[in-house]
Each structure stands twice: as structure tokens, then as C-alpha cells.
Image: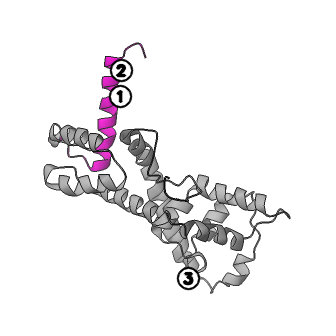
Amino acid sequence: MRGYQIKLTLPVQMIYPDGIADIFMKRFNIYDSLKIMLLTSCLLFVCVRLSAQATVDCNELLKRDISTEDPQQVLRTITHVKCFGLDSIDLKIFGKGPILGTLMMKGFQQNKDGKFTYGDLLIQINRERNDTGYPHVRKGIIAMNKLESMMATPATWAAGKELLKEIDTSDGEIENLHNFMLHNQDKRWNYRELVVYWGIQEKINDKKNNPEE
């Protein structure tokens, strides 16, 4: 991202080669949303179970080697808030397989002895969290969460427009989305659905206008 030093391909990058509809369709895919809901429920369950168990020695845990054979165990472990301090927004970033896998691979490559501990992983995570661009990434995720929960109507458009700007939607795309919303007020879409269906309509129009492509 221009002006920032984020080193990972985080779920919310503010500059994309794709159009805003493609971005939203990737970010807010219905199946992805279901997976996120299931993942969140599982994470909450794990956290409750962990809190009910005996106090975990974080110093001992952070010294423990990570095994590449069980990445799901790593995901389950980093949800322990006491030792890793990740909130729900952090987990949406670092709790993703590709991001977590990138951090782990990077850590194993940097350690000449081939070992990588949970303490090493925490250092990697905190390095990203302390990056100057990370607050912008978090802000984008929060904005997307709000867009997903907000109905797209003329009454909410002013607020929706500002949230769309926070994820770097262009003025032209915002104007097109506004017009599309006004022509589909009977659909009762939230902003995620508005953008997805607008993107689908745009692709249909492109095929009609360019049948040979």
C-alpha cells in the first residue's frame, strides 16, 4: 500500500487492481461469510473452554515449538487472548489460513535451526500490528463489517457513502452504486449485497456490450 509498510497480503488492502464489486465479492462471498460465522463461533467456544481450564503458563506456552503438521492447532492456540492478546479484528486478519501460513513460513525460514515457537509467532504478529499501516487496515475491516450490517436505502446512503470511502471506493463507483440502489429500492439489500449485485449486473452489461470477449 502506498505510504505504508504492511508486509503481508492482508484481507483488507486499500489498493486493488480489481473493481470495487470484485473486491466485495471476494471479501463478502456468502460462503466466506458463513465460514467466518462458524469460525467465530468456534473461536468463542475455544476461548470459553480455555478460560474454564487451569491458568495457562504463557511463558511456557510461548516457548513451545510449532509443528507444521497441525496448522489448525496453531489457530486454536493463538485465540488464547491472555497469551496473544488478539481481539476480534486481529483474528479476522491473523486468524486467516493464508496470513497465518505466511507468518509461519517466514518464521521457519528465518530460524536457521528450523524451529519456530509460539513466542516467535507472537513477535511476527506484533511486528505487523505495530506497523504504521495496520490501523488503516483495521479501520477498513470495521467499515466493511458496518456495511454488511447496514441496509442500503436512501436514508442510510450518507453514512454508507462515507464507509465506502473508508475502503477506498472511487467517486465513480460510489455514484454508480448510488444510481443502482435508487433503481432497486424494493430489493432490501444490505451494502454488501448491493455491491455484489451491482458487480454482477456490470459483468452482464460488459458481456452484452462486448460479446466477442
Label 1's element? Answer: helix
Q: Are marks 1 and 2 in contact (CB under 8 Å)?
A: yes
Q: Residue at x 15, y 42 (%)?
A: 185
Q: Residue at x 61, y 79 (%)?
A: 83
Q: Residue at x 32, y 48 (%)?
A: 192
Relative to 127, 42 lies left or right: left
| Disc 3: which residue | 52
Q: Residue at x 61, y 63 (%)?
A: 75
Label 2's element? Answer: helix
Q: Give the residue type that dot 2 points to.
A: Lys
Q: Quadrant of residue 199?
A: top left
| Disc 1: which residue | 203
Query: What mark, if any, has residue 163 been given in the picture?
Result: none
- Compared to residue 186, the image places residue 43 above or below, namely below
Q: Give the residue type that dot 3 points to.
A: Ala
- Around disc 3, counting alpha carbons within 10 Å, would you say few (fewer than 14), some (14 to 19), or many (20 or more)? few
Who is closer to the viewer here, 65 or 160?
160
Front tag of 1 and 3: 1
Q: Are marks 2 and 3 in contact (CB under 8 Å)?
A: no
